[in-house]
Image: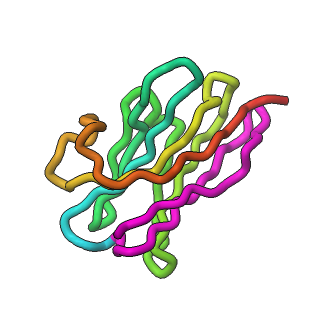
Amino acid sequence: QVQLQESGPGLVKPSQMLSLTCTVSGGSITTSYYAWSWIRQPPGKGLEWMGAITYDGSTYYSPSLKSRTSISRDTSKNQFSLQLSSVTPEDTAVYYCARVDYYTDYLRLNEYDYWGQGTQVTVSS
Protein backbone atom coordinates (compact mmCIF):
# COMPACT_ATOMS: atom_id res chain seq x y z
CA GLN A 1 0.00 0.00 0.00
CA VAL A 2 1.47 3.29 -1.11
CA GLN A 3 1.12 6.15 1.34
CA LEU A 4 1.87 9.82 0.79
CA GLN A 5 2.28 12.44 3.48
CA GLU A 6 2.62 16.18 2.92
CA SER A 7 4.65 18.32 5.31
CA GLY A 8 5.61 21.95 5.57
CA PRO A 9 4.66 25.24 7.18
CA GLY A 10 0.99 26.03 7.50
CA LEU A 11 1.49 29.79 7.32
CA VAL A 12 3.51 31.71 4.75
CA LYS A 13 3.85 35.46 4.42
CA PRO A 14 2.99 37.22 1.15
CA SER A 15 5.88 37.49 -1.32
CA GLN A 16 7.74 34.63 0.37
CA MET A 17 8.29 31.10 -0.92
CA LEU A 18 6.03 28.19 -0.07
CA SER A 19 7.91 24.91 0.36
CA LEU A 20 6.24 21.55 0.87
CA THR A 21 7.56 17.99 0.91
CA CYS A 22 5.75 14.76 0.14
CA THR A 23 7.15 11.64 1.78
CA VAL A 24 6.23 8.41 0.05
CA SER A 25 6.16 5.01 1.72
CA GLY A 26 5.22 1.59 0.42
CA GLY A 27 6.68 2.28 -3.00
CA SER A 28 9.57 4.08 -4.66
CA ILE A 29 9.18 7.34 -6.53
CA THR A 30 11.63 5.95 -9.12
CA THR A 31 9.48 2.93 -9.93
CA SER A 32 8.36 2.75 -13.54
CA TYR A 33 5.94 4.06 -14.75
CA TYR A 34 4.49 6.62 -12.39
CA ALA A 35 4.30 10.37 -12.02
CA TRP A 36 3.98 12.28 -8.78
CA SER A 37 1.95 15.45 -8.71
CA TRP A 38 1.13 18.43 -6.58
CA ILE A 39 -2.52 19.45 -6.59
CA ARG A 40 -4.22 22.17 -4.59
CA GLN A 41 -7.72 23.25 -3.66
CA PRO A 42 -8.36 26.88 -2.68
CA PRO A 43 -11.28 27.48 -0.33
CA GLY A 44 -14.57 27.21 -2.15
CA LYS A 45 -12.93 26.19 -5.42
CA GLY A 46 -12.09 23.03 -7.31
CA LEU A 47 -8.90 21.03 -7.45
CA GLU A 48 -6.04 22.53 -9.46
CA TRP A 49 -3.15 20.51 -10.85
CA MET A 50 0.12 22.36 -10.28
CA GLY A 51 2.80 20.11 -11.67
CA ALA A 52 4.43 16.71 -11.63
CA ILE A 53 7.74 14.91 -11.49
CA THR A 54 8.00 11.55 -13.20
CA TYR A 55 9.70 8.33 -12.17
CA ASP A 56 12.74 9.31 -14.26
CA GLY A 57 12.92 12.87 -12.93
CA SER A 58 11.24 14.82 -15.72
CA THR A 59 9.08 17.72 -14.61
CA TYR A 60 5.89 19.23 -15.98
CA TYR A 61 4.09 22.36 -14.80
CA SER A 62 0.76 24.04 -15.16
CA PRO A 63 1.23 26.93 -17.62
CA SER A 64 -0.50 29.31 -15.24
CA LEU A 65 1.95 28.52 -12.43
CA LYS A 66 5.09 27.57 -14.34
CA SER A 67 6.93 30.84 -13.72
CA ARG A 68 6.59 30.43 -9.93
CA THR A 69 6.75 26.65 -9.45
CA SER A 70 9.56 24.17 -9.03
CA ILE A 71 9.23 20.48 -8.26
CA SER A 72 12.24 18.41 -7.24
CA ARG A 73 12.96 15.09 -5.60
CA ASP A 74 15.31 13.39 -3.16
CA THR A 75 15.44 9.75 -4.14
CA SER A 76 17.52 8.81 -1.10
CA LYS A 77 14.63 9.90 1.12
CA ASN A 78 11.85 8.87 -1.30
CA GLN A 79 10.49 12.40 -1.22
CA PHE A 80 9.47 15.02 -3.73
CA SER A 81 9.02 18.68 -3.03
CA LEU A 82 7.15 21.75 -4.20
CA GLN A 83 8.40 25.30 -4.16
CA LEU A 84 6.05 28.13 -5.07
CA SER A 85 7.57 31.59 -5.11
CA SER A 86 6.10 35.05 -4.61
CA VAL A 87 2.98 33.78 -2.92
CA THR A 88 -0.14 35.87 -2.44
CA PRO A 89 -3.30 35.23 -0.41
CA GLU A 90 -4.73 33.63 -3.58
CA ASP A 91 -2.29 30.77 -3.01
CA THR A 92 -4.09 29.86 0.21
CA ALA A 93 -5.28 26.29 -0.29
CA VAL A 94 -5.13 22.70 0.83
CA TYR A 95 -2.14 21.20 -0.95
CA TYR A 96 -2.09 17.52 -1.92
CA CYS A 97 0.52 15.20 -3.33
CA ALA A 98 -0.68 12.26 -5.39
CA ARG A 99 0.40 9.48 -7.73
CA VAL A 100 -0.76 8.78 -11.26
CA ASP A 101 0.16 6.42 -14.05
CA TYR A 102 2.94 7.95 -16.16
CA TYR A 103 0.99 7.53 -19.40
CA THR A 104 -2.17 9.19 -18.09
CA ASP A 105 -3.16 12.78 -18.75
CA TYR A 106 -2.02 14.35 -15.46
CA LEU A 107 -4.96 16.77 -15.53
CA ARG A 108 -7.40 13.88 -15.19
CA LEU A 109 -7.54 14.00 -11.42
CA ASN A 110 -9.95 11.07 -11.17
CA GLU A 111 -7.15 8.88 -12.53
CA TYR A 112 -4.91 9.38 -9.48
CA ASP A 113 -4.75 6.26 -7.35
CA TYR A 114 -3.01 7.43 -4.19
CA TRP A 115 -3.32 10.78 -2.43
CA GLY A 116 -1.90 12.33 0.66
CA GLN A 117 -4.32 13.65 3.25
CA GLY A 118 -3.56 17.23 2.28
CA THR A 119 -2.03 20.08 4.20
CA GLN A 120 -3.54 23.52 4.73
CA VAL A 121 -1.34 26.43 3.72
CA THR A 122 -2.47 29.96 4.48
CA VAL A 123 -0.78 32.99 2.97
CA SER A 124 -1.17 35.92 5.32
CA SER A 125 0.90 38.60 6.96
Residue at (63, 51) in percent of width and height: 19
Q: What residue lies at 35% left-to-right and 55% top-to-bottom?
A: 114
Residue at 61% over, 46% down: 119
Q: Residue furthest right?
A: 125
Query: Looking at the image, how many numbered discs can be counted on the residues?
Result: 0
Image quadrant where one finds the N terminus = bottom left
Measured along the vertical axis of the image, is residue 40 above or below residue 1?
above
Please identify the residue farthest to the top as the structure is shown: 44
Vertically, is 16 above or below 63? below
- Using the image, determine if residue 103 lies above or below residue 89: below
Pinpoint residue 11: horizontal percent, then vertical percent: 76, 41
Q: Residue furthest bottom?
A: 76
Residue at the image point whose x is 37% and y is 41% from the top: 61
Residue 104 falls left or right of residue 90: left
Percent coordinates x, y for residue 41 in the rendering:
51, 31
* Magenta span: 1-29
Where is residue 112? Give x, y as percent.
29, 47
Task: Answer left or right for 26 relative to 95.
Answer: left
Q: Quadrant of the C terminus?
A: top right
Q: Nearer the viewer, residue 7 or 69?
A: 7
**Residue at the front extreme?**
1
